[in-house]
Image (cartoon, coloured by chain):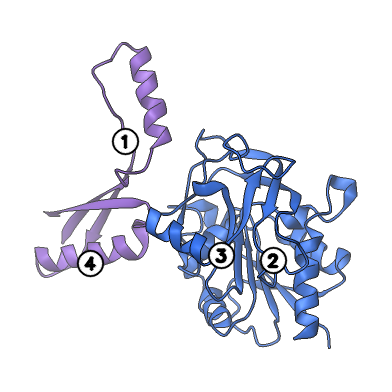
C-alpha cells in the first residue's frame, strides 16, 4: 500500500485571486514579509501497487485525467510507503 | 418533420426546467429531458446542456459530469456534427470534456455574479447565430461564480483566427470594455464554438431571456437560429 499526496495549484502564470485576498489579509495582520500566497488543493490517494513507480504512475494518470485540469493547474505527486 | 430538442439532466442541474420551458413553451419545439444515465440519442436533433451545479461542482465545475454515461453519447453526437449548446455549467462541462478548448477560473473578484449583461455577437457563421448580425448587442443574464474563461495565448490566437469567439461581454452600446468584463475572462469571452462550429458554449443564459416579462427576449434569437437551421437541414 502506498499513499500519494497530490498538490494541485493554479499555474504560475495565472493570477490566483483567492491567494491575493489572503495575502491582503495577512498584510492587515502586519505580516508584510509575505510576498505571495497561492492557494491550491491537497488530495490524498491510497493506492494498491507493487512498487513506488507503479503507484506514481497510477497517481499521475488520476491527476492528468481527473484531479487536475492542466489547462489552468499544475500538480505535484509525492509517494509514501504506508 | 419537426426537430427534437434534448435537455440533459445531471444530478444538480437547476436550469433544466428553464431550458425546457424556453424550448417547449416559448419556441414550441418538440423537447424532452434526457437523464444523465441515458445513452440513446438517436431521436434527438439538438442537445442542450443546461446550467446548474452538476455533482455539486465537486473538484471543479463540470469535472465529474463529464464522466456521466450520457457524455460518451454526447461526444459521438457532436463528432457526427450534431448541434450542442452548453449554457453556464453546460459550458463548463463541454470544456472539461475537451469538446471546447480552455478552462474556467473563479470570477476575478471571487463573487458569484447574477445580473443582466450585454453581449456582442461576433460571428453569424454558426447555426446558433445565423439570425443575429455581427456586432448586434443582446441583453442576456448571467449567474455564475466560475465564468472567468481562461486559455493560453496560443489557443486564444487560434480562437481569434478561426472566428470561434461567438459572444463577448460589452456595454449596452456594444463596446467591448474592461468594465463590461465583470468576471475577468480573457478577451471578454462570453461564448465560443469549436472549429466545426456545431458546438457552442456560453456562460450567459439565453433560456432565461425569452420573454419580455422577465426583462429580455434576446435569447430567442439564438433558439430561432437553431430552429431555422434544423428546419432547412
Q: In the rendered structure, the residue with mark 1 lies on which chain?
A: A
Q: What residue sits right under mark 3 in the picture?
A: B163
Mark 2 sits on what residue? Answer: B124
C-alpha separation, residue under disc 1 versus residue under disc 3:
35 Å
Q: Which mark is residue A58?
A: 4
Q: Earlier in the sequence, mark 1 or mark 4?
A: 1
Q: Chain of mark 4?
A: A
Tell me, yes or no, if residue B152 can be seen here: no
Read off the chain for label 3. B
* Picture coordinates of residue B103, whole percent (x, y): 45, 55
Labels 4 and 3 within one chain: no
The residue lying at 17 percent from left, 62 percent from top is A56
Q: Is residue A78 left or right of residue B135?
A: left
**Label 1 with label 2: CB-CB less than 8 Å:** no
Letter of the blue chain:
B
Q: Residues within 10 Å of mark 1 (few under 14, many from 20)?
A: some
**Eyeballing the image, is B65 above or below B14?**
below
- Residue visible at 23% across and 17% down? A33
Tell me whether circle 2 and circle 3 mark residues in contact (CB < 8 Å).
no
Q: Earlier in the sequence, mark 2 or mark 3?
A: 2
Residue at 31% from the left image edge and 63% from the top image edge: A64
Q: Chain of mark 2?
A: B
Distance from the alpha carbon under mark 2 to that under mark 3? 10 Å
Please, what secondary structure does the residue beneath circle 2 have?
loop
Task: Give the quarter of the figure containing the N terminus of chain A.
Answer: bottom left
Q: CA distance from mark 1 to mark 4?
A: 26 Å
**Is B219 rendered above or below residue B71?**
above
Image x and y of residue B210, in percent: 83, 56
Q: Which chain is purple?
A: A
Task: Specify the quadrant of the image occupied by residue B164.
Answer: bottom right
Residue B215 appears in the figure: yes
Q: Are marks 1 and 2 on the same chain?
A: no
Amino acid at each position: 500500500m502506498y499513499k500519494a499526496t497530490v498538490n494541485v495549484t493554479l499555474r504560475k502564470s495565472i493570477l490566483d485571486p483567492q491567494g491575493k485576498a489572503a495575502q491582503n489579509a495577512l498584510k492587515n495582520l502586519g505580516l508584510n514579509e509575505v510576498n505571495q500566497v497561492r492557494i491550491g488543493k491537497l488530495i490524498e490517494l491510497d493506492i494498491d501497487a507493487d512498487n513506488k513507480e507503479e503507484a506514481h504512475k497510477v497517481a499521475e494518470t488520476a491527476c492528468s485525467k481527473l484531479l487536475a485540469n492542466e489547462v489552468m493547474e499544475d500538480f505535484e505527486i509525492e509517494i509514501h510507503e504506508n | 418533420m419537426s426537430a427534437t430538442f434534448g435537455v440533459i439532466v445531471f444530478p444538480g442541474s437547476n436550469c433544466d426546467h428553464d431550458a425546457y420551458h424556453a424550448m417547449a413553451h416559448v419556441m414550441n419545439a418538440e423537447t424532452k429531458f434526457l437523464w444523465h444515465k441515458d445513452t440513446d440519442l438517436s431521436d434527438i436533433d439538438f442537445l442542450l446542456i443546461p446550467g446548474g451545479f452538476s455533482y455539486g461542482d465537486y473538484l471543479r465545475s463540470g469535472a465529474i459530469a463529464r464522466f456521466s454515461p450520457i457524455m460518451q453519447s454526447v461526444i459521438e453526437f457532436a463528432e457526427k456534427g450534431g448541434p450542442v449548446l452548453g449554457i453556464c455549467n453546460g459550458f463548463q462541462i463541454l470544456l472539461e470534456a475537451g469538446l471546447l478548448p480552455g478552462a474556467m477560473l473563479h470570477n476575478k473578484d471571487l463573487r458569484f455574479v447574477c445580473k443582466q449583461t450585454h453581449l456582442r455577437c461576433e460571428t453569424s457563421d454558426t447555426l446558433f447565430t445565423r439570425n443575429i448580425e455581427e456586432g448586434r448587442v443582446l441583453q442576456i443574464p448571467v449567474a455564475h461564480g466560475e465564468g472567468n474563461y481562461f486559455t493560453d495565448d496560443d489557443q486564444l490566437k487560434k480562437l481569434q483566427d478561426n472566428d470561434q469567439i461567438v459572444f463577448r461581454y460589452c456595454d449596452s452600446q456594444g463596446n467591448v470594455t474592461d468594465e463590461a468584463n465583470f468576471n475577468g475572462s480573457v478577451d471578454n469571452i462570453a461564448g465560443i464554438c469549436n472549429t466545426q462550429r456545431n458546438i457552442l458554449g456560453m456562460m450567459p443564459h439565453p433560456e432565461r431571456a425569452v420573454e419580455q416579462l422577465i426583462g429580455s427576449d434576446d435569447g430567442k434569437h439564438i433558439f430561432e437560429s437553431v430552429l431555422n437551421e434544423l428546419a432547412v437541414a
